[in-house]
Amino acid sequence: MPLHRSCSVSVFPTVSALALAAATVLTLAGCGGGDGAKAGAGGPGGGGMPPPQVGVVTVQPGAVALPTELPGRLEAWRVAQVRARVAGIVQKRQFTEGAVVVANAPLFTLDADAFRAALASAEATQARAEAALAQANAQLERNRPLAENKAISAQEWLATQTTAKAAVADVAAAKAAVQAAKVNLDYTAIKSPIAGRIGRAQVSEGALVGPTDATALAVVQQTHPLYVNFTQSAADALRLRRAFDGGQLKRAAGGAAAEVRVVLEDGSEYPLAGKLLFADPTVDPSTGQVSLRAELPNPSGVLLPGLFVKVRITQAVNEQAIRLPQQAVTRETAGDTVLVVGEGNKPVKRPIKIAGAMGPDWVVTDGLKAGEKVIVDGFQKMFVPGAPVTPVPWTPGAPKAGGAPAAAAAPASGAAPAAASAASR
């Protein structure tokens, strides 16, 4: 019996040790199988995740116009204040407020009775003067032979001549008075001095108006074409001139007038281009600005005087500038940067200088070289900073880069369960 107890004691520990050893081996085998699966999934030829695809554009310097955006306001081509030339009572308004009127179109009618009476009186005075002239001429002709024969004194003959000349002057004065009365009568019909769009009437029927009134009866504005008045910093103008003199930039229009584009308050660009008329040769000492003026066609009357606009004017051309899609540029307080595909297809951050916007692109003047590849799309696939990428040509409007890598990664995502199944077996 003692011998039997010692055998039983020695058998159970042996079985337990064997079971523990077998479990340890299986565990180690499972761990080794996991490493093998990972090696097969991530290693070469094992169907692992390839470098993510990113859309790139190849840098190609070329001649790019450099637009300058400046604040400005629209001004009517002509502005005429409608005023009364004579005093009178307004009898009738003959226009529709806000309508387009032609030159010499009747706008207001004043009470003309007093002016008709003044004209009749002037005409009567003229008739009296003409009658007196006729009598003086007759007397002159009667006294002429008498004076030649010394039948009348020299004093009497001189008086006859003077009377005739005075009668001629009286007739001329009477005719001038008649003409003035006619002009005043015509002034009772107040007409538009220019063609254009008329605003609201400042007086109504029954109002007494006159030439000394401070307020105009109405205002007519010619809005086709329009003036665009804007200003530019004198420092910017001087910097631009130095760039011209140094050969970095070329004048955009040569000897022709520079083209001007207008951006409205809602951000839309006016479809018709204007032309620069002049730049003031004097700098405003209070603001340090130079005044410029452009002419802008407005055949449909969409634009109104006084409207605030942004003026885009192309003053120079950079023959070595680069256009990049705006989504490729990161704008920060420290400066503008892009990601360039560097050695080993690794993204490299690169600072750049931007001269302005042109449509959907930024105009880059420094920081890039011809032939470099700039990343435009696929940033969301770049999980590991500095990891290699697969550059593919980017086309505006094309599907975003990164769709292909997702499909290629599908087999890799299925390899892990297979390896786990093999390890369990």
Image: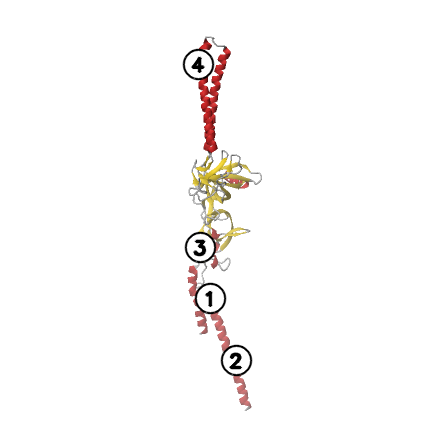
Mark number, residue 39: 1
State which mark lies toward you, 1 or 2: 1
Q: Which circle, 2 or 3, is nearer the viewer?
A: 3
The residues tagged by marks 2 and 4 sit, at their Cα atoms, a distance apart of: 168 Å
Secondary element type, mark 4: helix
For label 2, the residue is 17
Q: Which mark is first along the chain, 4 or 2?
A: 2
Cα distance between the residues tagged 1 and 3 = 30 Å
Residue at screen point 44% across, 65% down: 412
The numbered mark at residue 408 is none
Residue 24 seen by the camera: yes
Can residue 79 be spotted in the picture?
no
Q: Which residue is located at x 47 percent, y 70 percent?
A: 33
| Contact check, label 4 and label 1, Cβ < 8 Å | no
Q: Position of residue 228 (x, y in %)?
A: 48, 41
Amino acid type at circle 4 is: Glu
Mark before the other along the chain sequence, 4 or 3: 3
Mark 2 and mark 3: Cα distance apart in space? 61 Å
Residue that mark 4 sits on: 141
Residue closest to the far bottom? 1
Name the mark nearer the viewer: 4 or 1: 4
Residue shown at 53% from the left, 89% from the top: 4
